[in-house]
Image: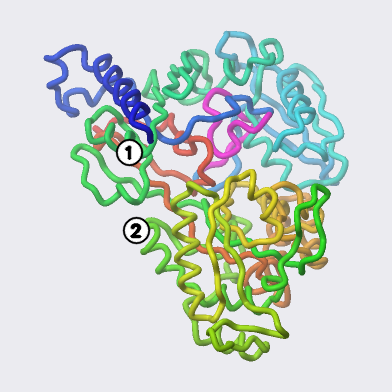
Amino acid sequence: MKKIGLIMMFVLIGILGACSSGGDNDSKQTKEETAKKDELVLAVGGETDEGFDPTTGWGMYGSPLFQSTLLKYDKDFNVENDLAKDYKVSEDGLTYTVEIRDDVKFSDEEPLTAEDVVFTFRTAKESGSVIDLSNLEKVEAIDDYTVEFKLKQPESSFITLFVTTGIVPKHAYDDSYNENPIGSGPYQLVQWNKGQQLIVEANPYYYGDKSEFKKLTFLFLEEDAAFAAAKSGEVDVVAITPSFAKQNVPGMDLVELDTVDNRGIVFPYVKSGEETADGAPIGNDVTADETIRKAIDIAVNREALVDGVLDGYGTPAYSVADHLPWWNPETEVKDNEMEKAKKMLDDAGWKENDQGVREKDGLEASFTLLYPAGDEIRQSLSIAVADEIKDLGIKVKTEGQSWNDLEKTMYSNPVMMGWGSHDPLEMYNIYSSETRGEGFYNTNYYSNPVVDEYMEKAMHATTQEKANEYWKKAQWDGETGFSSKGDTPWVWLVNLQHLYLVDENLDIGDQKLHPHGHGWPITDFIEQWHWKK
């Protein structure tokens, strides 16, 4: 960070400290003496670029905070009512009827009705954003508190949109809503100083369990400044990287939260020769060979990557959805099997040349592994994996590129990517033949008709339980699938742990498995946070 940036951040911390301390005498108070305060200061992640509009994606990776959703997940991913009192799905899976509460108000004291739900989903459908409502034929209010959704075809994952889409007010929605959100969630936005802080206060009209904390201040600090704020006692909760996790901070406890915030290598699945509509090359002759991918998959030592790159703060990853309800645990592979991987390559005709690099039919086993420039963890993982698979006789160069450059090169080169959400539709997005070349989805042009059929059945199932059966078969059915047991279009490596320093007197309760690191998923159950007795 530039020197002037650090100065500004520490000035901000100083101001907040002065505001909360109330003078020299008060500044001498211990945390125990002020433990019952009803305000929290948090530095728990980056600042959103798009603002706080759920119709364009805010809240997909954590609580929307300012808005309520029709349904919600509990800690074990069971679906519970939120705004909804009840919902029904027709036998053919085409009609969802949702009855909502009649006692809900937005933070401006206006009542929330079925019209607001209809407006939210119609606006989201028209936004062309990351929220996929292409299968929604129509949504309409049956009465003031009943909404009916009609689908073009059954879609088991549609209910996930009830969990992730916050409801916006029809009467107060305009072009500036993303910066001035009004909602029916537990908090309301008071002040947003872009690049510095966001201040929110409890919504007095919130219908749910009330939080113990009347005011939250989110600081937008870079890693060093955030850790310095923790050491100075100016924040109550701060997200940190593994490099800071082993340093003791008096008055703060380290909280390690498991996630599906994964990192893995997406390998071009087809041979070279084609181009995208924009002229970007597609395919890679080396990684199109299944044996290359499978050998790398079993040769890498995932535990060593967790220990060496993440300082132990993570878990080995075997899929995009480890330990979620739709994950197939049979897809775990035994790794760190270098000799088995070498034999696999030998048997497939990949022989080492005089330089120790394998060749087959005149093709050298070499490629460039790309990663987003500036991402230290992805860079370190790329270098570590490249070093490991040198022993296989595969030559790998690592290179950091901007996201703009990656958009042109990611179809023809392996890339260190990351995914992880609470929506099984993510598997469809990155493995379906229908999504090949769509943005950052199926960048390796993977295709398997059996997998496609399973995923179509999963998406069109009329119950989530039946859908999960098909999602698991798409990963591995005993003969084929998109997992390591099957086609291995990805080599998944690690799931990060999300690390936080938390005031030792603050109890943030149990958390569900965190998604990819967008948004502020730690605030999901903030109404349950409390000072310890």
Residue under numbered circle 1: 224
Establish if 496 lies above or below 62: below
Pointer 1 local density, CA inside 10 Å: few below 14, some 14–19, many at least 20 = some
User: Whole-Å distance between the Cαs marked 1 and 2?
Assistant: 18 Å
- Indicate which disc residue 311 carries: 2
Please, what secondary structure does the residue beneath circle 2 have? loop
- Indicate which disc residue 111 carries: none
Please, what secondary structure does the residue beneath circle 1 have? helix
Q: Quadrant of residue 58?
A: top right
Amino acid type, mark 1: Asp
> Do the residues under discs 1 and 2 have CB atoms within 8 angstroms?
no
Establish if 472 lies above or below 193: below
| Residue 515 coordinates in the image, percent (x, y) | 53, 46
Is residue 418 on the magenta stretch? no
Secondary structure predominantly adopted by residues drawn in magenta = loop
| Residue 381 coordinates in the image, percent (x, y) | 47, 61
| Residue 219 coordinates in the image, percent (x, y) | 39, 27
Residue stretch in magenta: 56-74
Amino acid type, mark 2: Asp
